Image (cartoon, coloured by chain):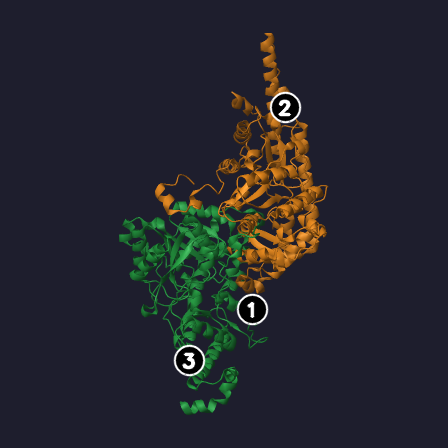
Chain colours: A green, B orange
């Protein structure tokens, strides 16, 4: 008899994908400005490190929150014992206010409809357990975050059927590709329970248009299915068009009439907007009280530490802080985004036009030796091992067109980003030269890129 | 939660609409009664006293003191803020190395340094709740089962079964041998499962036991190890109460048996741990899966993504547990205080003839109220329990909610309140028991008198019950709730 469960022995945890393999290579040889300047730069991790100084100043000014105190009195005992899965009221109140503020207060949220979970990872899995079972499917616009393969499918037995989006219309969701995905699910004998979108999108960095939101809401109304909107990047929208939350779109009269409120749910987290992934703060927001009730009970398997809830309840209740933080964060993200886009453009590489997120969706199709995923993997390996950048290959995000890559820009210093751009430029230059040269034998091709570049500098002048 | 309409039933999954969350059990009903009328020494002295929650409040002052003296442990204080960014960003499911080292060291200390734990085998989970579910996902497929000796913690019904689809098969233990786990009982349960074509994947034990408060002796542990090796099934040992052993005999962890028994297949042994009971930190959600099986460690680690411990908390715990001087003092103090509480509690009950199962660990007693049952049935147990909640105003947990096969046993928690509250609780129990005896005596006499047609004045209730050292000077004499229950 086999000792382990099927879940333990399958590979639905998704960690055999290149998305994670790149991380492993990075771990073996991580870049460090001083200790390892030729190491691999991590551009595969969508982390937000840009606004820590704002957080640190706040902490310095608010010692009570850190020291288990309230108004100078110790509340350690109260916090240490607090395991109520309804969550600390002060924290939930502060969190819903913060979520509203990010949406320019165009929508408001009721703390009683919020369920706290151990990160968005847990929130997404919990929603699957609440809404679907083995044999069911959720439709997801592709490309999508590789972690969804684990979070939505692994222990739940639910399937993902991609909604294939195309670069021809900037990867927007259309009625046609929605229907195709729905039909594909039916063909595979899967019961479609809902659609899950990430808005702003990971990996695209774009926000959904009002038309797309209307389309989605109409579709789920017709089919009687759910819509989960993972709005984990809602605080990272740094340029127009402005962010429209699914809750705002629902307020449109035509949708109000249809009573589709109970089918729409939001997932949120503080891992991206506040840059606190280690604290494991996730949330589910739903107008469906049965979903809230079930998810609340399930949250027992992954509650947020009361110590963390307390700290953040004080921090997010400080409106002066949240206002400053939200603005500063967007400003810095915008600057970084511009830097990366301009730098890559100099190297003849375009990015999908984007207004949000911690990354760019980079078009390197012209650098593929053939329009295939094999060629994409080859290119990805070159970027990883020769250029020393861990970026994420589009195929790991289930993109249907080879040649797209996600480059993260907010998880490093400006100097490191500068160096990454520099390395890419050098790579592209030598790549251009390599592709123009007649085919040589493979021994020649394995010579260091840097050696080629140095010896060919004069020639480059002539070619210009 | 309320009735779910059929529309909603279609919109939600079977798991969401089932009662697999287990909250309809009487274990939680008592909590609801407490929530709606919670006792407070000054603000609500007639409220319900919570004795159904196995929490450890006895040493919180020591920890509070430590926290105040160690601001660096918090990454948010001026002393510790330098680490803030790195800690806030760290989401590696391996956990902070200092956290794992600290937990491994602590687990060793609690076992008298008789064993060593490898920090690389420590996997985080969302409390022991998350840890149990995680190990069930790793070991069992839907329909597979775990054997569990009764009585057992009601939360297992949810933790091991709800979302995993696994089953629990009880291994019946009896009061006749103090609820010891016997080979006969194990074999019987296993056999029954085989006949029902249910695949057993493992045996789950809690040692020290909840609700019994007893520890397993060496022979029993070896019997269990032999049993699981023979059947090639897993042994999951929940050692969440390991540091609450306040009297001899000493605690023997499964880890000691593993190191002694060279024949034992280590791939089958897994330990569940948490800081919620030993330290009284349920709010911090520190759950641990420790496995001797490399494949399980590997996969459990990946699954732990669904319930990692906040790095802010990992940092605090690491600092706390690596302070050896503090930990040594804490372990001793914790044991002493628990021992004293246990003694106070059991002695007072003994004075009125209420026996508790002889125990040396845990945060509770396993109280034998069989003499108070009208009949030896679970209905009578429920009736008695309702009386205790509604009239005596104590939330205790009925044995049936722990799947005990014999009616009349109740789990009473004693470590989750201060001394004053404990006094009030004991007074209420004593009063109740004495009044019950009074009524029984009166009933018997009445029965005899009726039979003999004699009329004699009834003895005054006031004289027998109002023994000054037992009654609170503030409480009026309540009418015995059993009068209404029996009539």
Q: Is residue A30 left or right of residue A338?
A: right
Left-right relation of B237 to A90? right
Are the residues under marks 3 and 1 on the same chain? yes
> Where does the image place residue A369, in percent across and percent down from the top left?
42, 77
Q: Is residue B143 visible?
A: yes
Q: Which residue is mark 3?
A: A347
On screen, residue B278 versus residue B22, left or right, reads right
How packed mark 1 is, by other alpha carbons closer than 10 Å (few <14, some 14-19, many 20 or more), is: few
As rendered, which of B406 and A183 lies closer to the eye? A183
Q: Chain of mark 2?
A: B
Q: Nearer the viewer, mark 2 or mark 3?
A: 3
Which numbered disc covers residue A27? Answer: 1
Task: Tell me the residue at 68%/28% (across/down).
Answer: B351
Give the CA separation, mark 2 to mark 1: 73 Å
Could you give the CA–CA distance between mark 2 and mark 3, rounded to whole angstroms?
93 Å
Image quadrant of residue B94?
bottom right
- Rate crowding at label 3 as few (under 14), some (14 to 19) or many (20 or more) other CA atoms within 10 Å: some
């Amino acid at each position: 008899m086999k000792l382990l469960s099927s879940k333990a022995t399958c590979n639905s945890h998704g960690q055999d994908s290149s998305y994670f393999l790149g991380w492993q290579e990075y771990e073996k040889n991580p870049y460090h400005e001083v200790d390892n300047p030729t190491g691999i730069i991590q551009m595969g991790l969508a982390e937000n490190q840009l606004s820590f100084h704002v957080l640190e100043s706040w902490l310095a000014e608010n010692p009570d929150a850190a020291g288990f105190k309230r108004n100078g009195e110790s509340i350690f005992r109260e916090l240490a014992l607090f395991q109520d899965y309804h969550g600390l009221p002060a924290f939930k109140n502060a969190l819903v206010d913060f979520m509203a503020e990010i949406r320019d207060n165009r929508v408001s949220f009721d703390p009683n409809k919020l369920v706290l979970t151990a990160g968005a990872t847990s929130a997404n899995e919990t929603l699957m357990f609440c809404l679907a079972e083995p044999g069911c499917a959720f439709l997801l616009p592709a490309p999508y975050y590789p972690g969804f393969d684990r979070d939505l499918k692994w222990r739940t037995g639910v399937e993902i059927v991609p909604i294939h989006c195309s670069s021809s219309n900037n990867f927007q969701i259309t009625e046609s590709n929605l229907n195709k995905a729905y039909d594909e699910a039916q063909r595979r004998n899967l019961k479609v329970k809902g659609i899950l979108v990430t808005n702003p999108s990971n990996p695209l960095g774009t926000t959904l248009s009002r038309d797309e939101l209307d389309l989605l809401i109409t579709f789920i109304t017709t089919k009687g299915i759910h819509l989960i909107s993972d709005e984990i990047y809602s605080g990272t929208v740094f340029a127009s068009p402005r962010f429209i939350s699914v809750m705002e779109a629902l307020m449109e009269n035509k949708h109000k009439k249809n009573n589709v409120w109970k089918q729409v749910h939001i997932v949120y987290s503080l891992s991206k907007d506040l840059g606190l992934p280690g604290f494991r703060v996730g949330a589910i927001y739903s107008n469906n009280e049965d979903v809230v009730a079930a998810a609340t009970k399930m949250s027992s398997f992954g509650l947020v530490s009361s110590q963390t809830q307390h700290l953040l309840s004080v921090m997010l209740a400080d409106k002066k802080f949240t206002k400053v933080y939200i603005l500063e964060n967007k400003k810095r993200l915008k600057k970084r985004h511009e830097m990366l886009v301009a730098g890559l453009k100099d190297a003849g590489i375009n990015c999908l036009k984007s207004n949000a997120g911690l990354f760019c969706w980079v078009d390197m199709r012209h650098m593929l030796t053939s329009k295939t995923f094999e060629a994409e993997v080859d290119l990805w390996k070159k970027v990883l091992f020769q250029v020393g950048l861990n970026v994420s290959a589009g195929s790991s995000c289930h993109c249907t067109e080879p040649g797209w890559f996600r480059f993260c820009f907010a998880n490093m210093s400006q100097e490191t980003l500068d160096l990454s751009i520099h390395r890419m430029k050098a790579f592209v230059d030598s790549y251009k030269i390599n592709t123009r040269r007649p085919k040589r034998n493979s021994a020649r091709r394995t010579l260091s890129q840097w050696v080629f570049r140095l010896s060919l500098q004069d020639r480059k002048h002539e070619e210009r | 939660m309320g009735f779910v309409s059929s529309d909603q039933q279609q919109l939600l999954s079977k798991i969401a609409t089932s009662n697999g969350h287990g909250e309809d059990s009487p274990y939680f009903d008592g909590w609801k009664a407490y929530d709606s009328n919670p006792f407070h020494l000054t603000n609500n002295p007639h409220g319900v006293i919570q004795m159904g929650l196995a929490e450890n409040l006895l040493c919180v002052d020591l920890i509070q003191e430590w926290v105040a003296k160690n601001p660096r442990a918090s990454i948010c204080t001026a002393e510790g803020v330098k680490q803030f960014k790195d800690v806030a960003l760290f989401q590696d499911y391996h956990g902070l190395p200092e956290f794992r080292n600290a937990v491994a060291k602590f687990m060793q200390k609690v076992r008298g340094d008789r064993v060593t734990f490898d920090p690389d085998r420590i996997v985080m989970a969302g409390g022991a709740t998350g840890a149990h579910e995680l190990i069930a996902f790793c070991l069992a497929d839907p329909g597979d089962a775990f054997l569990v000796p009764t009585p057992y913690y009601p939360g297992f019904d949810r933790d091991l079964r709800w979302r995993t689809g696994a089953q629990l098969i009880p291994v019946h233990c009896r009061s006749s041998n103090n609820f010891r786990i016997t080979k006969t009982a194990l074999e019987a349960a296993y056999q029954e499962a085989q006949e029902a074509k249910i695949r057993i994947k493992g045996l789950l034990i809690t040692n020290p036991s909840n609700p019994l408060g007893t520890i397993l002796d060496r022979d029993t542990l070896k019997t269990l190890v032999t049993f699981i090796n023979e059947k090639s099934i897993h042994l999951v040992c929940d050692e969440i109460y390991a540091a609450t052993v306040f009297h001899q005999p000493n605690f023997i962890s499964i880890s000691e048996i593993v190191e002694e028994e060279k024949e034992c297949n280590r791939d089958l042994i897994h330990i569940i741990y948490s800081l919620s009971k030993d330290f009284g930190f349920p709010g911090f959600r520190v759950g641990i899966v420790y496995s001797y099986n490399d494949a399980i460690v590997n996969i459990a680690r990946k699954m732990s993504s669904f319930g990692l411990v906040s790095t802010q908390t990992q940092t605090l715990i690491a600092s706390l547990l690596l302070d050896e001087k503090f930990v040594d003092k804490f372990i001793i103090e914790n044991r002493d205080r628990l021992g004293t509480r246990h003694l106070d509690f059991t002695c007072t009950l003994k004075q009125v003839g209420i026996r508790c199962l002889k125990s040396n660990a845990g945060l509770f007693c396993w109280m034998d109220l069989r003499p108070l049952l009208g009949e030896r049935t679970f209905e009578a147990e429920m009736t008695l329990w309702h009386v205790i909640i509604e009239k005596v105003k104590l939330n205790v947990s009925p044995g049936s909610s722990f799947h005990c096969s014999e009616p009349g046993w109740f789990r009473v928690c004693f470590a989750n309140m201060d001394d004053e509250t404990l006094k009030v609780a004991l007074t209420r129990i004593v009063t109740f028991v004495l009044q019950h005896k009074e009524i029984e005596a009166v009933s018997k006499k009445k029965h005899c008198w009726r039979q003999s047609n004699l009329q004699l004045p009834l003895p005054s209730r006031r004289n027998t019950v109002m023994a000054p050292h037992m009654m609170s000077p503030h409480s009026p004499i309540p009418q015995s709730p059993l009068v209404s229950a029996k009539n």
